[in-house]
Amino acid sequence: MLQFTKIDEESSIEGYFCSKKKVLFLYSYNIYDTNTLAMLDKHEDTLFEKGFLHYFSNLRDTSTRHLLFLFLVSHICVVTNASSSFDLNYIQLFKTLDSVRTKLQGSIAEVLKTVPGLPKDWLTLGRLCSPRVLFYFEQRPPVLDENLKSLQHLMEDQIYRLLRKCRVITNVCTNSLFAIPSNQEFVFFKPRQQDRFTFLLELLNDTFEIGNECPSDFREFLSQHIILAQTEGFSDNVGRHVGPSIFVLPPARVWFDAAFKLFDFFTNSPANSLKGFQLLRSILDVEGQFSEARCLKVLPLALAAYQENLPSHYSSQYHENKKTQAKALLSSHGRGPAVQKFLGRLDTECDRFWRNGRRMCEFPSIIGNPCIQPVHRVHAEENSDSKLPVLPHMSGVRYVSACSCGRRQANREDPYDVEYANYGFYRLIEEECCGRLRHVTFPIFKPSSDHFEPANLKGASKSMHFARDVEKLITGTEDLSLGPDENEFPALSVDHLSQVAADDHEESQTSLGKGEATEAIDEDNIMEIAGTHELPAVSTKDFSTTEYLPCMLHVNSPSGILPRYSSWSLVCLGSSSLYSHNAGLSDQPGFLAGSGFLLPWDIPVRLQHNESNGLDGRRAHNLGYSGKGKRVKQGQHEFTVKIFIGVEYECPRGHRFMSSSPGRILKATGAGLVKDSAQLITQNDVPLYLPCPCPYNRGGKALIAQLMRLHVVTPKAAVHVTIDPKVRPAPPPCPEFVTGFTEPIQLSPSSYWILRFPYVYEDENQIYTHPKENARAAQHGYLLKGTCGVMEFANE
């Protein structure tokens, strides 16, 4: 009874027991059968995934193990030939089985020792006997019936001489894989055309009666060998001085116990567990051996290709690109099923080489550029690998930025923390420029002792939303490399910042009340502010002195907590005469041609001296210069105030320009004539970001300029120009960031003021930087309208 098994079972052995004749028939269904080989086309997916050579070598290995198992537990083995001629491939298969059997002799004996009641001769020999092999040819040769018997004898002589010459059989059958009877027929040709299954069904018929069958019937041919095995046993040794052969006929219980244990041993033992199985694999898998040798030769070449021209440390993207090149080399020169295995080895070796001191830190900056230092620790890190060097983060990208007053430009390092971006860089550059000018002190945290800590803001998980795509980061780095030469501006590094950071914030910002003690740059232009300029009163009693705000102030910030430093800056350059509307901003470097002008705005003002409050509707945008007035009614005076304002944008390359209206760049005539007014700027929300009209851009991608300064020239009039900026740097629900003053800041008359905005904005949850898409830059964030206004002098 035969039953086809699924191909994913690889190989199987099926059996049938004839109780009348007490004969057990075993049939090996394996890859050596033509029918099984023809079924491989039903498993195209498996063959495509694993490769034909790899899959077929595994099938051959399993099938050969099962054949060796049959030679160890059988007395008679029938070898079939699909044609009428002897298949010479059997010679190599027999020699392979014999070599593997010799190597596994000790392991087989160890398995048989676990079988109770096993005959001693079986344990000594490792098998029941040297099995007798019979050859069955499924096709009849084209001869007459009377000549068929002679042809069988001729085939027997030919097979015997061939096996003897190839040393498959010897005089002592115990030393051979199998034996051939010396005085009995062992070759049979099928007498009539019959399919294999019909033949086996007849062979395994329960009756198994020979009866009146013709003398050439296979059952009679096989029966004579079975009867001899059941009665006397086989003695197929040849020679005069050869001892008796070992032949064991065990009980069925012992045979089944030993057979199951041997089958488990041959089926489940790994290919590299024993030398015998290793030998079997090397003999059968010739293609695999060639593939292994070829790939082993190409692997060092692929590794050398990966290591060629490598920098001292490099990014993960560069690492992956080099691995891809090395894998392409291995795939093009490697052959066979071992290519995938060696690709995995190559991947592992390249990763090990990269991680062994060549990894780049790649920690993203606030802008999103990766750190180009080797993997390292920073000073603030505690629970990190102590073997790593202590280095600051550095992306290698430098931007060009102006100081708070705008009269000096310098290279700035790509910021990795908000404090350096909004405060530290400007603090450093102030030492050589605007440090001697009068500054407005913004509300900041003032500790009462040396022990203070950041406030625990509930529901706020601080996370930076950076662009971590390494390819975009490197592209952005290349775009910025076309900026001014590094030697053109002094570089302000984080190390330099650390020398100054120990100073108190109060020393870095001089309040307007201390203006008299400040050294003047130009006595004609610097005006006296004391007694004429009042700031909104901020009581320090209402704020915590032990906890500080770990982010910037915004409208939703908890009350009573201030930041450690101010991200804003308000500085007075001096008298309003510093600005000439005809000449423009002559002392401000970096402005694009025709864009260095402020916008005039005439505001009619009506003063009521009998009222102490400010003007109704005084929150007009931007600031001015006084004009002639006239009296209207008793107690009232109406006149026009001329204010000059400028909304300044700055790009990472240091290009600066003013805006004539929301979303438009100011462009004066060749004679310096400005036709626009500041009305549209003051009465609308002003975009925080605009595409920069740089004279050159790589790949046609314009850089994004950010609103960084608000220029205000106040008039000579009995009014105060006020500013109260509110910035929303991203679409809602982004909060509105404020300066911290409870009332608008009053600017002294006849002065030139510059308000510097933060470089980046940070709330409790994230850091807001410029948008990644230029097309939507103007709609990303806004300086909200109502920033500027006019207020009457307070009555004294």
Image (cartoon, rainbow, N blue to C red):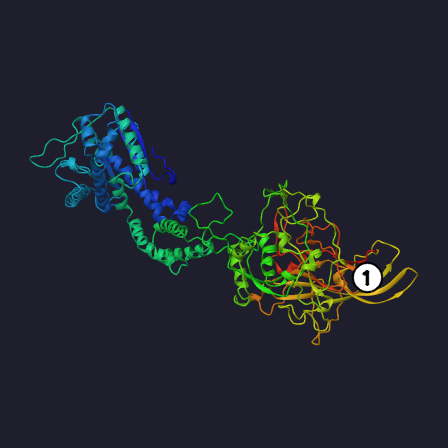
Tag 1 residue: 718
Q: In which quadrant of the rendered view does residue 123 lie?
A: top left
Q: Nearer the viewer, residue 252 or 716?
A: 716
In this picture, residue 265 sits left or right of residue 571:
left
Q: Nearer the viewer, residue 742 or 113?
A: 742
Percent from the top left, x then y, of residue 649?
Answer: 65, 63
Percent from the top left, x then y, of residue 658?
Answer: 68, 66
Relative to 155, does residue 416 appear above or below in the rendering? below
Q: Nearer the viewer, residue 63 or 436?
A: 436
Percent from the top left, x then y, of residue 750?
Answer: 76, 64
Where's the C terminus, which quadrant? bottom right
SS of the residue at dot 1?
Answer: loop
Q: Amino acid at mark 1?
A: Ala
In this picture, residue 443 sits left or right of residue 65:
right
Residue found at the very far front of the displayed protein: 517
Residue found 73% across the figure and 66% down from its top = 576
In this picture, residue 212 sits left or right of residue 588:
left
